[in-house]
C-alpha cells in the first residue's frame, strides 16, 4: 500500500492528512477526492509539491534510507531497549516527514528531471509513471483535475465567501458540506473510503448543475462509489 500526502493550510498551521490508498486501484479517485474535499472549504488552500500529480510515499526498506532525525532517534531507542524495530519501520513508512521531501517528479528522465546530478534525497522509483510531463499530456490526469478545480474555485465567489455548513455530519464515510452565497448553494461531497456509501440529505443533488466529478457516472446519493467526489450547484 502507498500513501498520498495532502496538506491544508489553515491560518498558521499545516494539517497533514495521510490518505491510505491502494495505488493501482484507487490512486486517481483517492487523490482527486481529497483534493475536492479540502480545496473548496473556507480558508486558503495549499498545494504541496507533488500533491497535484498524486505523488506517493517513498518505498522505504531500511533505516538507512530515512533522513528524518526523529525517525532515526526513535529507531535507536527502540533498538537499545530490545523493541520491535520492524514494526517501527512499518509505522514510519506511512508516517514520516521524509515522504513529503522526495524530489518533484517532472518527467521520466534521470532523477525525474529534478536535477542533473544525484539529489540530496532519493527519487521515488515510480517517477517513470507518475510525473508532470506524462500528466500534462493526459486530459484525464490528476494534474488536469487540479487545474479544473482551481478554475472552478476562481470562477465563483461562492467558494471563497460562501457560508459553510456540514451535511449528514455524523456520517463516518462521507464528508459533505455546502457553501452558500446569496441565493446560490454549492454542494461538495466526498466518500473518503474504499467502500460504497450513502448520504442522508433532502437536497436534490442529481438535479443540480454538476461542476466537477471524478467518476464518469451519474450521481446517486444512495450508492456513492469508493473515493467518489463531486461538486454541484443547486
Image (cartoon, rainbow, N blue to C red):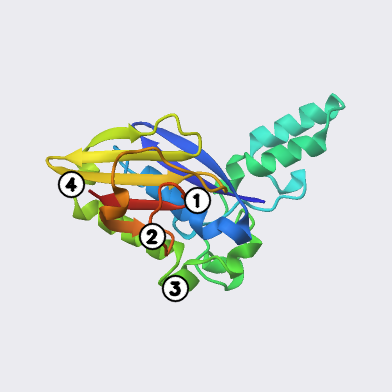
Q: Residue furthest right?
A: 82
The residue at the point 50 percent across, 51 percent down is 227
Question: Mark 3, mark 2: which one is toward the viewer?
Answer: 2
The residue at the point 46 percent across, 50 percent down is 224
Q: Which circle's residue, 4 or 2, is located before the other in the chain? A: 4
Q: Which circle's residue, 4 or 1, is located before the other in the chain? A: 4
Question: Mark 3, mark 1: which one is toward the viewer?
Answer: 1
Q: Residues within 10 Å of mark 2 (few under 14, many from 20)?
A: few
Q: Which circle's residue, 3 or 2, is located before the other in the chain? A: 3
Q: Label 3: which residue? A: 138
The circle drawn on residue 227 is: 1
Q: Label 4: which residue? A: 157
SS assignment at label 1: loop
- Disc 4 from disc 2: Cα separation: 26 Å
Asked if residue 16 lies left or right of residue 211, the reply is right
The residue at the point 68 percent across, 39 percent down is 92
The circle drawn on residue 218 is: 2
- Disc 1 from disc 2: Cα separation: 15 Å
Question: Mark 4, mark 2: which one is toward the viewer?
Answer: 2
Q: Which circle's residue, 1 or 2, is located before the other in the chain? A: 2
Amino acid at each position: 500500500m502507498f500513501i498520498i500526502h495532502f496538506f491544508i493550510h489553515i491560518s498558521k498551521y499545516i494539517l497533514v492528512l495521510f490518505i491510505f490508498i491502494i495505488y493501482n486501484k484507487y490512486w486517481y479517485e483517492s487523490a482527486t477526492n481529497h483534493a475536492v474535499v479540502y480545496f473548496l472549504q473556507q480558508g486558503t488552500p495549499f498545494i504541496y509539491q507533488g500533491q497535484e500529480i498524486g505523488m506517493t510515499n517513498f518505498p522505504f526498506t531500511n533505516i538507512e534510507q530515512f533522513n528524518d532525525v526523529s525517525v532515526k532517534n526513535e529507531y535507536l531507542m527502540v533498538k537499545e531497549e530490545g523493541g520491535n524495530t520492524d514494526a517501527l519501520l512499518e509505522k514510519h513508512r506511512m508516517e514520516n516527514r521524509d515522504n513529503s521531501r522526495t524530489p518533484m517528479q517532472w518527467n521520466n528522465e534521470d532523477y525525474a528531471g529534478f536535477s542533473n546530478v544525484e539529489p540530496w534525497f532519493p527519487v521515488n522509483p515510480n517517477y517513470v509513471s507518475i510525473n508532470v510531463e506524462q500528466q500534462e499530456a493526459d486530459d484525464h490526469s490528476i494534474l488536469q483535475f487540479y487545474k479544473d478545480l482551481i478554475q472552478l474555485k476562481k470562477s465563483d465567489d461562492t467558494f471563497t465567501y460562501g457560508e459553510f455548513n456540514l451535511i449528514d455530519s455524523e456520517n463516518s464515510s462521507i464528508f459533505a458540506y455546502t457553501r452558500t452565497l446569496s441565493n446560490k448553494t454549492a454542494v461538495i461531497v466526498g466518500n473518503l473510503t474504499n467502500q460504497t456509501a450513502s448520504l442522508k440529505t433532502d437536497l436534490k443533488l442529481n438535479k443540480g448543475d454538476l461542476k466537477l466529478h471524478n467518476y464518469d457516472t451519474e450521481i446517486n446519493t444512495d450508492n456513492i462509489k469508493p473515493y467518489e467526489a463531486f461538486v454541484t450547484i443547486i
